[in-house]
Image (cartoon, rainbow, N blue to C red):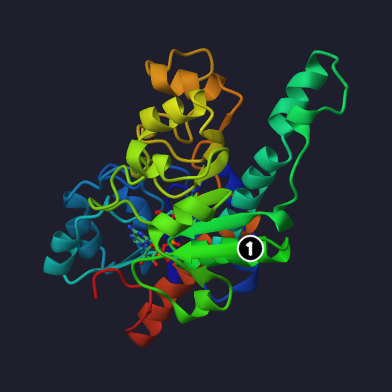
Amino acid sequence: MKVVVFNKREDEEKLLELWEEKNPEIEVESYAEALSLDNIDLAKGADTVSLSSVAKLDDRLYGALKDLGINVISQRSAGFDMYNLDKMNELDMKLINVPSYSPNAIGEFVVASALYFSRNLNLIHENVKKHDFRWQLPILSREIRTMTVGIVGTGRIGRACAKLFKGLGANIIGYDVYESEEAKELLDYVSLDDLYAQSDIITFHVPATDDNYHMINEDSISKMKDGVILINAARGTILDTKAVLKALDDGKIKGAALDVYEHEFDIVNKDKQGKDLNDDMLDEIIKRNDIVYTPHIAFYTETALDNLISLAIDESINYLKTGSSPSIVNK
Ligand code: NAD
């Protein structure tokens, strides 16, 4: 069997080599370039292709792959909105994704962000830069075990966060539109308003649906404790950035960790050094020391990348061998 890998990034190279060593019976060819009508010949002889597309695929590519006898594509991400599933169904082609690659990776990042603000590292660094080395009230910290952590969205990532915060001894409460038995072993479910009222740290792990658009807004922030630490490592659109900036100015929010941003499309995973970002709000977010902004990077660990590669390719081969896979998107 043969798989041709497109969009191979430098950070995937070593991990792909390891996958090849573990699967010597599968022939692997890999290219950094994206699959296109111009280079479709590179896929000749393959049983399946693995892509990591960020842009919408040209509709004509599906037929071109089909002509080469390729009916299965694996996408090395959870998101698959760049694929035309209707077209794939029409041609009886299957798309495989990786719905979950390492919730723990995001969990660790969330805990690091919480500790960054709970231990006042932003203020301490600023003081040290000014050669102010005093122990003093503004940097006197609380330990996580004396705090209540509120988790909104107790799915895979929310639960991974709960496990880690539990290890630090926090009191953990959660809210989800669908409560899970697994989560109940880690946290106590409360209403969303109670979660806002009781939490010292609130972390959001809900999807970007129409219902969740700007669920963190002036009104919801007003229900939170004064001095709350807010973390969004879910999706940018769930948070009204302007409302958060105002609440930081008012001292309502102590610190905000934003791994996602509502207008992030033009910057994530791009080198903009020396270039104007043409986004005043983003400039402010980056400048402020009560915000730690990171470019949608919470997932970015060796383990997660390894899982993205191996779960995508393994499942496409599983499908080819058995005619089924739990990771098929268009069942
Ligand atoms: P999941 O589907 O396992 O869990 C999401 C949970 O949110 C579900 O239990 C759902 O019932 C709940 N939910 C939906 N709307 C809600 C609402 N209004 N209030 C309360 N609960 C609600 O998803 P997941 O894998 O845990 O992912 C969570 C989020 O993290 C997604 O938005 C995903 O895109 C994002 N994510 C971010 C990164 C990153 O690097 N920052 C990486 C992967 C995923």
> Which residue is more in the foreground, 132 or 57?
132
Q: Residue at x 41, y 41 (%)?
A: 221
Looking at the image, which is closer to me, 213 or 76?
Answer: 213
Please give the name of the residue rendered at 76% of the width and 25% of the height, measured from the top-left corner: 125
Three-letter amino acid code at disc 1?
Asn
Q: Nearer the viewer, residue 275 or 18?
A: 275
Which quadrant of the figure contains the C terminus?
A: bottom left
SS label for mark 1: strand
* Image coordinates for residue 284, horizontal then vertical, percent: 48, 19
Residue 135 occupies which quadrant of the picture? top right
Q: Up-down: is 324 above or below 253? A: below
Q: Quadrant of residue 130?
A: top right
Q: Which residue is mark 1?
A: 171
Residue 153 in the image, given as x and y percentages of width and height: 43, 61
Residue 52, given in percent of the width and then of the height, sits at 41, 51
The quadrant in which residue 175 appears is bottom left
